[in-house]
Amino acid sequence: MLYAGSVAKYNETVTGRLTGLGQKTGVRVMGFAAESAAAASRKYFKEAYSAAREVINSGRYSLYKKRWASGDRNAQYQNMVDMFSDLTSPENIYVKEYGYPTFTHGYDAYSAPFIFKAPLASGTCPTLDFLELFDGFDRYSNGTIKVTTGASNTDGTYLMYDSPMDFFANAEPRLRAYVIFPGDVFKGKEIEIRAGVYTGSAPITPLFNNYTYATAETRYQNLSAYTQASKTLYLSAREGNGQEIVSYEGVDMTAAGANGPFYDNGEGCLTGLYGRKWLNPDPSFEAGEGRSAQPFILMRYAEVLLNAAEAAVELRLAGEASPDGSDLLQVATSAVNEIRERAGASLLVGSVTADNNGRNIVRKERRKELALEHKTKWDLRRWRVQHYEERDGFWGEYRQKDSFSNNARYRFRGLYPFFSTQTGKYFFDARFQWVSLKTFEYNIVDYYFAIPGGEVSKSVVIDQQPNR
């Protein structure tokens, strides 16, 4: 119902309205008629709200807080790590269970950090864009994460840290449960992530003077600091014998550490970050194809709260009364704050408002809480925010689309730690993902899947989507 309500409303914001009748039958095969779209949207959002409220009021489910403790960031982090493997969780509504050796999957085999390669690695690398959704980081005026002393990442000098983990000291505990930070511990081992070693003098000015979309393909290995004879930047193309070596305090240091990124190996931490969510944290577990058996949660109570919050704001935006007499905006605010409290995030100041800002607060919380749970793809589709004209709202909040996109394609950014031999400290560079360069494209027509041509051609009643 939430999906249908969104399509009925936001289809109307797309050029061409993504609607049409089938050529064979004259029956509408996608979208809504202009005269019925608004009414349909209100109807579906009411149904979504009522269904969510019924689950909430039943008292059968609650947020997982077995290890949670107020003010204890480590407890809050561990609580959110545990909740995805605990089959007795009061939050679980619909779970796909596995059992070794008969019914297994290979998530760890493809997504674990590079040092656990079995047979591949690094298949899930969260982006800096994702990181920037979360609380706990200093920021520039445009909202991006601060890595220098200046007003932008081309200004001032790099901020220095004794350990990469110091950069994340104030990050939401929820984020740490979802993402492996450089220097954090996983399966009993420190996850060494390093883009390179810098041997030049300090303070260190930004490695690039331009970090815009247009310069995304200028990579670290193109810099004169790396290519010149008296080099000050050391990188590694590959692991093992491919590593460049720097002597630091009498010890040989590999340029890219144990996990990379390695600029000629797309399996080595493309973005400087690893996904932690869904990985098996047991140090005794050996990853391999068909060896993983941790469950996958298809629906949980947090999603129900977010469904209620989103439908509530949409109903208020449409001027509709609450289906059950509840205060729509209070329900939305309470739902978001329940989730944020459990996550260790700051609570909202004031109430969710009946405007696009209030709607985007809920969307942003959904992007954060349900990340890596197969929800985001469908949320972006139903909100109609993935094509260029609407890409400012790509993340559920305002973003300046020309900072990561041109009129057809877009890129994601990474957060890359470097070690400075002159200071014995680390600094971070924030730039577009630079290993196995990746760009993405999404056009309006892609909001609907094409029906297989063979099915269309052999049937007198199956029509293809218009414009296919």
Image (spheres, rainbow, N blue to C red):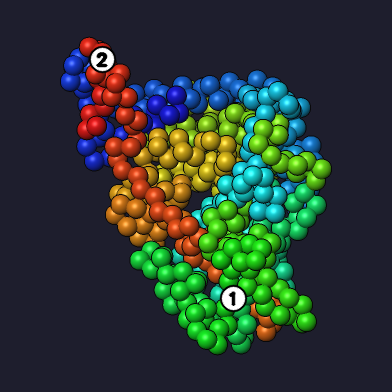
Q: Residue furthest top?
A: 460
What's the residue at 41%, 65% (across, down)? 216
The one of 246 and 12 positioned closer to us in this rendering: 246
Looking at the image, is 304 positioned above or below residue 127?
A: above
- The residue that appears at 69% across and 61% down in the rendered structure is 258
Q: Is residue 15 left or right of residue 392?
A: left
**Distance of label 1 from label 2 (alpha carbons):** 60 Å
Which label belongs to residue 458? 2
Q: Is residue 138 visible?
A: no
x, y percentage for residue 253? 71, 73
Residue 448 figure quarter: top left
Helix, strand or loop at mark 1: strand
Q: Is residue 290 visible?
A: yes
Instruction: Find residue 197 and report its horizontal and vertical position in percent.
Output: 63, 75
Q: Provide the secondary structure element on which disc 2 rests.
A: loop
353 or 168: nearer the viewer: 168
Q: Residues within 10 Å of mark 2 (few under 14, many from 20)?
A: few
Indicate the position of residue 331 as horizontal and vertical percent values: 56, 34
**Label 1 environment density (alpha carbons within 10 Å; few <14, some 14–19, many ≥20):** many
| Three-letter residue code for mark 1 | Tyr
Q: Residue at x 76, y 58 (%)?
A: 190
**Residue 196 coordinates in the image, percent (x, y):** 60, 71
Q: Earlier in the sequence, mark 1 or mark 2?
A: 1
Q: Which residue is denoted by mark 1 in the rendering?
A: 234
